[in-house]
Amino acid sequence: MPKHIFVTGGVVSSLGKGLTCASIGMLLERRGLRVRLQKFDPYINVDPGTMSPYQHGEVYVLDDGAETDLDLGHYERFTNAPLSRDCNFTTGKIYLSVIEKERHGDYLGRTVQVIPHVTDEIKAAVRKLAADDVDVVITEIGGTVGDIEGLPFLEAIRQFALDAGKANVMYIHLTLVPYLKAAGEAKTKPTQHSVSQLRQIGIQPDVLICRTEKPLAQDEAEKIGLFSNVEPRAVIEERDKEFSIYEVPLSLVNNRLDELIVEKFNLKAQPLEINDWRQMLQRIKSPAHDVTIAVVGKYIRHNDAYKSIYEALDHAGIALHSRVIIRKIEAEEIERDGAERVLNGIDGLLVPGGFDYRGSSGKIEAIRHARERKIPFFGICLGLQCAVIEFARNVGGLADANSTEFDPDCAHPVVCMLDEQYAITDKGGTMRLGSYPCVLVENSKAQQAYGATLIHERHRHRYEFNNAFRDQFAARGLAVTGTSPDGQLVEVIELRDHPWFLAVQCHPEFKSKPTKAHPLFRGFVQAALGRREKKSSPQRTREAVVGAS
Ligand code: GLN
């Protein structure tokens, strides 16, 4: 029977529970254990698919098409645990299931209540992951202890220990120990309060992970342990990271968290194997080059809206011994100030996915700039669609070309709705979602980057390249280098007469890892590095000459 770790958060939100869970998962996996990860989000939306990126950040898509919380992105980047729609439940999804059962008569006329029906539903969601081939299930409870909407989840995980047996369940509470400059010391009171709230619910944490700015002194850890009824060695410091989020697992190892878990559950585990991870961190700390990539999007102000894109760029940088400096640019800034000025000095341009008309002309202008100046360009989903519009207007001679998403009645709809989308009016989960195969053209840049002709990537879109324009554009240099296996859906386009101009309908960013950069991101950043070198070499020569004289 698998063991269960429940991770809660206290004091403030945004403490990095997702990263901590991902790190714990990674450490256990690298001790030879089979791990599953799961997140509960206490909000009422059934999934984040219809939520604004300003509210929620990125919507992370899984192979099975589930639209999930971005913490699942951390789980995938840190571990090899398979993820599915059973790995993310919101209050809305739990209640939807309870209400459907009630309508179906499954409760046999009983009064349906939070306890036991909703809590049973939550526990069943946890058990869904507890298959025979799993050693440890890690369940993250979103939100902060004390939130009203989180109560049914906390009650359910309290009950879970009664059902599964105390020896099979562990509670880890992530908390904040703020450092007060004026007092010159760390303050433990908020943690004491937060643990006391948890204990009122009936949950006694086994481990406290304390987010700190400064090292946690021994006496502070002891004090926290005493007030919280937690043994001092289980009060673990997780200090702010200077370089990278990928350092989190190491600080947990330094505090022997993996040891503590293995011991508590009496698991048969191998010695920890993280040499490749350490090497990866070493590369982050000593990059040989800098390269500047502009990301032009609509939700740039929200730090998490393009989370996986930023991570995938970093991964490519790690693979290429380089630091990717990401210049985040609001598309409307280009509409206001012009591409020339805003994009000055960049080595590469990336236009990510998005929805809706706002900012589209700025993106199109940016792509034109990259095409004409031969700046490496990588378009993703809406980025591909904008590249097609740009090409149609400025190379194809169709000045009124557009996507029907932006102008339903346009004369030249070079991007239009997928046939199967016409009948659907419901907003949730109705796109082309999840993993689909794609066949690449031999010797195209995409095929060379992947080193394969059949690939699988995740999708999240309603619109696509309009096949009616394929031949006409191909004649002018826009090559379709990847399609669905039946050849019907355009998945990848490239420009022949350009150092690296490639766009995809899928979202490759979801499959990149720090230890295994995605081939397209790697190819793109490599091309940007190539441009940077070209740009800088005449100057370097001049400097050398001046230096010599
Ligand atoms: N809005 C576009 C579509 O639905 C692109 C979607 C995206 O970039 N994820 O097709």
Image (cartoon, grey):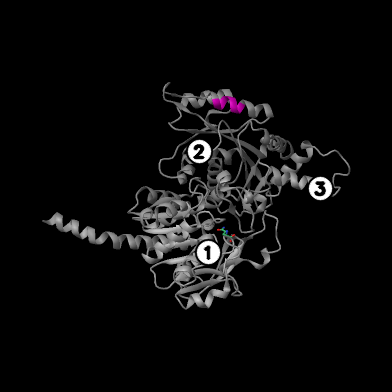
State the image coordinates of residue 459 (x, y, percent, origin top left).
Answer: 59, 61
* Amino acid on which disc 1 is placed: Gln
The disc placed on residue 101 is 3
Report helix, strand or loop for mark 1: helix
Mark 1: is the Cβ under 8 angstroms from ligand 1? yes
Please name the residue that numbered disc 1 is placed on.
385
Is 194 a magenta residue?
yes
Q: In this view, does 341 lie to the left or right of 397?
A: left
Residue closest to the far top: 183
The disc placed on residue 161 is none
- Within 10 Å of disc 2 (Cα), the crowding (few <14, some 14-19, many 20+) is some
Residue closest to the far right: 109
Magenta range is 190-195
Q: Is residue 480 above or below residue 115?
A: below
- Quarter of the image with the C terminus in it: bottom left
- Circle 3/circle 2 CB separation < 8 Å: no
Query: Which residue appears at 52% of the width and 23% of the height?
Result: 223
Mark 2 or 1, nearer chain start: 2
- Circle 2/circle 1 CB separation < 8 Å: no
Report helix, strand or loop for mark 2: loop
Nearest-to-viewer mark from 2 and 1: 1
Front residue of 391 and 439: 391
Report helix, strand or loop for mark 3: helix
Nearest-to-viewer mark from 1 and 3: 1
State the image coordinates of residue 192 (x, y, percent, origin top left).
Answer: 57, 25
Please name the residue that numbered disc 2 is placed on.
256
Q: Distance between the residues labelled 1 and 3?
A: 42 Å
State the image coordinates of residue 271 (x, y, percent, origin top left).
Answer: 51, 47
- Within 10 Å of disc 3 (Cα), the crowding (few <14, some 14-19, many 20+) is some
Residue closest to the far left: 549
Mark 1 or 3, nearer chain start: 3
* Amino acid on which disc 2 is placed: Arg
